[in-house]
């Protein structure tokens, strides 16, 4: 099966609105940064050089569905990793209840939200063809912007969605974006603490 992805592009930035004026059709996207403490996450920490080694994207404040690249269970072998729909109360996070996180809320336009959801839907429809980008970890560590066909690590995927939806623009190729790079572009989080203790009320 051939799955053609739109190359990462930077859409024009959304015009700045006068102070206090809310944009029409305002929506929110959520970025969730985590570190589970598994042996694999400790290896990733050497590559990503940040407090958090994993990042996911959610399309609503409940965080009932978190989209990323990784494993569905710590019982899975590393080479089985790929595109996953995570649950904050299930899968890896149920197995690792001590997982800490930081959650950021991004305000986006209706069009940016629609674009982001459309990209995620594409990955969901062809979930089986997407694999974890182990070669990309090496290229990232040496600063080589190398895009591997149908392969992503978590931060590459999130950066790809944000850039192609026109939500954010980056100073380097999405293939080089680490969780710490994404986190460094964001402002005050809506929540920091145990993932299992998060509720949508924190985002209000």
Image (cartoon, rainbow, N blue to C red):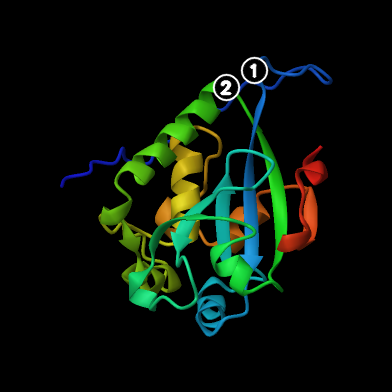
Between 98 and 114, the one nearer to me in the picture: 98
Q: Which residue is mark 1?
A: 25
Q: Residue at x 70, y 42 (%)?
A: 105
x and y, in percent, of residue 130 in the image: 31, 56
Q: Residue at x 50, y 80 (%)?
A: 40
As measured in the structure, the alpha-carbon distance from the residue carrying label 2 to the one carrying label 1 is 5 Å
Label pair 2/1, CB-CB below 8 angstroms: yes
Is residue 72 something that shows in the picture? Answer: yes
Between 9 and 157, the one nearer to me in the picture: 157
Between 22 and 69, the one nearer to me in the picture: 69
x and y, in percent, of residue 53 in the image: 58, 69
N-terminal of the two: label 2 or label 1?
1
Q: Which residue is mark 2?
A: 110
In this rendering, the answer to whether 80 lies above or below 61 is below
Element assignment for label 1:
loop
Quarter holding residue 91: bottom right
In this rendering, the answer to whether 28 lies above or below 80 is above
Between 157 and 124, the one nearer to me in the picture: 124
Residue furthest bottom as drawn: 39
Q: Residue at x 40, y 71 (%)?
A: 137
Tell me if mark 1 has few (under 14), some (14-19) or many (20+) residues whose alpha carbon lies within 10 angstroms of its own.
few
Quarter holding residue 22: top right
Quarter holding residue 140: bottom left
Tell me if mark 2 has few (under 14), some (14-19) or many (20+) residues whose alpha carbon lies within 10 angstroms of its own.
some
């Amino acid at each position: 099966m051939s799955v053609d992805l739109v190359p990462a592009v930077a859409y024009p930035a959304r015009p700045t609105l006068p102070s206090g004026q809310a944009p029409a059709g305002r929506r929110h996207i959520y970025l969730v940064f985590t570190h589970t403490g598994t042996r694999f996450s400790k290896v990733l920490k050497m590559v990503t050089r940040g407090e958090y080694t994993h990042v996911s994207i959610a399309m609503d404040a409940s965080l009932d569905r978190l989209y990323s690249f990784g494993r569905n269970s710590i019982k899975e072998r590393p080479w089985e990793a790929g595109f996953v729909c995570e649950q904050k109360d299930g899968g890896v996070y149920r197995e690792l209840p001590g997982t800490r996180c930081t959650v950021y809320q991004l305000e986006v336009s209706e069009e940016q939200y629609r674009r982001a959801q459309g990209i995620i839907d594409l990955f969901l429809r062809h979930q089986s063809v997407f694999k974890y980008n182990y070669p990309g970890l090496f290229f990232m560590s040496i600063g080589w912007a190398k895009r591997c066909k149908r392969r992503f690590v978590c931060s590459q995927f999130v950066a790809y969605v944000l850039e192609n939806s026109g939500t954010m623009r980056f100073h380097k190729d999405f293939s080089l974006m680490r969780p710490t790079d994404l986190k460094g572009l964001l402002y005050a989080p809506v929540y920091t603490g145990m993932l299992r203790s998060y509720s949508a009320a924190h985002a209000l």
